[in-house]
Amino acid sequence: MLRLILALLWAFFSMVFSLPAHWRWKHIAKKDPVKAWNKSWKYVRGFFRGLIFIAGTKIELRGTENIPEDQPVLFISNHRSYFDIIILHTLSKTPIGFVAKKEFRSYPLLPLYMEDIGSLFLDRENVRESLKTINEGTERLKKGLSLALYPEGTRNHGDTLLPFKTGGYRMAEKAKCPMIVCAFTNVGRIFEENKFHFIRRRHVILEFDKPVYPHQLEKEEKKAFYDSIPVRIQEMLDTHKA
């Protein structure tokens, strides 16, 4: 209970007292969105590190050498928890945003900071709006912003992966940037999967696969790679249990 209370207080006061910074980032973004993403990323990364500290989470990393330091990445991951986003944000070597469900727009304060770091809101039920979001994501990748995509579409607390929605993969292809498949284990047990949603100390494993450049692949190779992504994630998850 104490960890949950501390996390809520940390989140509330961090967002409320940083509202002036939010307005400053919005002003900067009008002229230089890349500069604004960098500034907000550094702040939000510190905020997320505070949440991880409060949660008492131990993170075991595998394959971090596969993350390039000098170019944006489209990260593809399984999705078990809000802590997926929190942890990945603290580990990215470049500013990073997220592709989130449109429902996040209705949350108080949170959408402001999601937009500051370059996150996008995807309406999967509206094809035209989805295409606009994918095109915008492509442009942001070209400008140097990394993005995290969760093809399951929602947090999954089951034993098997949900069907993957692959439309967002085209962002990396069109932006000519790498895709890195990654897998989280035990992250849902920090918060969502606990009774009464209390925050618990957990040992989380996060593994990064080698980068793949879809634009360099032939048509059949690219299709085979996209089809293999759920298998790659499941194989990593299986090794985490060994």
Image (tube, helix red, strand yellow):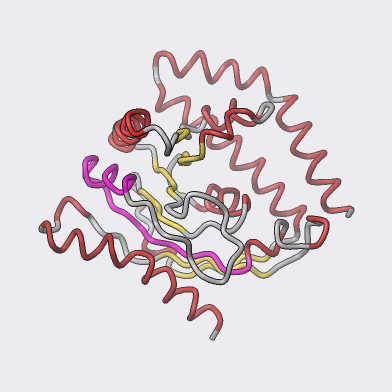
| Above or below, comparing residue 179 to residue 101 in the picture | below
What stretch of residues is rendered in magenta? 167-186
| Above or below, comparing residue 26 to residue 241 in the picture | above
Q: Residue 75 at what x, y percent from top left?
A: 40, 52
Residue positioned most to the front:
125
> Residue shown at 48%/81% (left/top)?
239
Occupied quadrant, residue 40: top right
Is 172 in the magenta? yes
Residue closest to the eye, 45 or 85: 85
What quarter of the picture does the C terminus occupy? bottom right
Is 22 in the magenta? no
| Above or below, comparing residue 70 to residue 20 in the picture | below
> Residue shown at 52%/28% (left/top)?
115
In this image, 117 relative to 216: left or right? right
In this image, 145 relative to 227: left or right? right
What quarter of the picture does the N terminus occupy? bottom right
In this image, 83 relative to 99: left or right? right
Q: Residue 8 at what x, y percent from top left?
A: 80, 41
Residue closest to the eye, 195 or 23: 195
Q: Residue 5 at what x, y percent from top left?
A: 86, 46
